[in-house]
Amino acid sequence: MVHSVLFRRLAIILSVLLLAILSTFPVQAQETVVVDLTITSVTLNRAGNIIITGILACAEPGEALVRADASEQVGRTFLSGSGEISDIVSCGPAGTTVTVSVTPQVGTFRPGVVNVVLLTSVCTPDRAICSGVGSDGEELTLRVKRTN
């Protein structure tokens, strides 16, 4: 008898919770924003960091986060690192130049063949939420020389 009362109370609580969940406001679907990110140059600075520059364009005004990864095989050592732009980047149809410095986790990058990836994630803000989202990236393997 104690169990049947307990199960009834539990059934009532679960029913109320289910009703509360189902009666919440519907979530509005996010639209996809067309984003184009193109690497325009990759250089190696004197400090041994890879500098990746690109153009970021969005079909409509938005706010973007931009990050980059780089890797290089130097002899028996595999070097890799990442970097990001610490501020939000404005994105629009006219295009914005973005530059990310990639510092290796150990050692320094050297002149030679490197693999680089430039990535972005974009949000078109509408009040306090993202009404649209988009992303893009580009990966290149190329030979870099040290710049002066």
Image (spheres, rainbow, N blue to C red):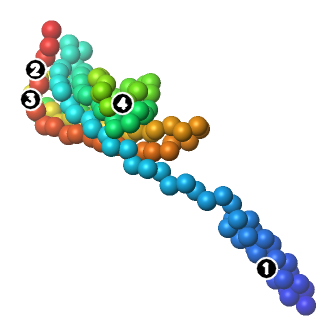
Q: Is residue 128 or residue 93 the one in the foreground?
A: 93
Numbered label attached to residue 30: none
In this rendering, position of residue 22 left or right of residue 49: right
Q: Amino acid at mark 4?
A: Gly
In this rendering, position of residue 144 left or right of residue 6: left
- Residues tagged 3 and 2 counted as in contact (Cβ below 8 A): yes
In this rendering, position of residue 92 left or right of residue 13: left
Q: Amino acid at mark 3?
A: Arg
Residue at (24% x, 15% y) in the render: 47
Q: Amino acid at mark 1?
A: Ala
Q: Earlier in the sequence, mark 1 or mark 2?
A: 1
Q: Nearer the viewer, mark 4 or mark 3?
A: 4
How many angstroms separate mark 3 from mark 2 (CA)? 7 Å
Q: Secondary structure under badge 4? A: loop
Identify the residue under disc 1.
11
Q: Earlier in the sequence, mark 2 or mark 4?
A: 4
Identify the residue under disc 4.
92
Q: Where does residue 29 sit, x and y in percent of width and height? A: 50, 55
Can you name the residue that lies furthest to the top here?
Answer: 148
How many angstroms separate mark 1 from mark 2 (CA)? 70 Å
Identify the residue under disc 3.
143
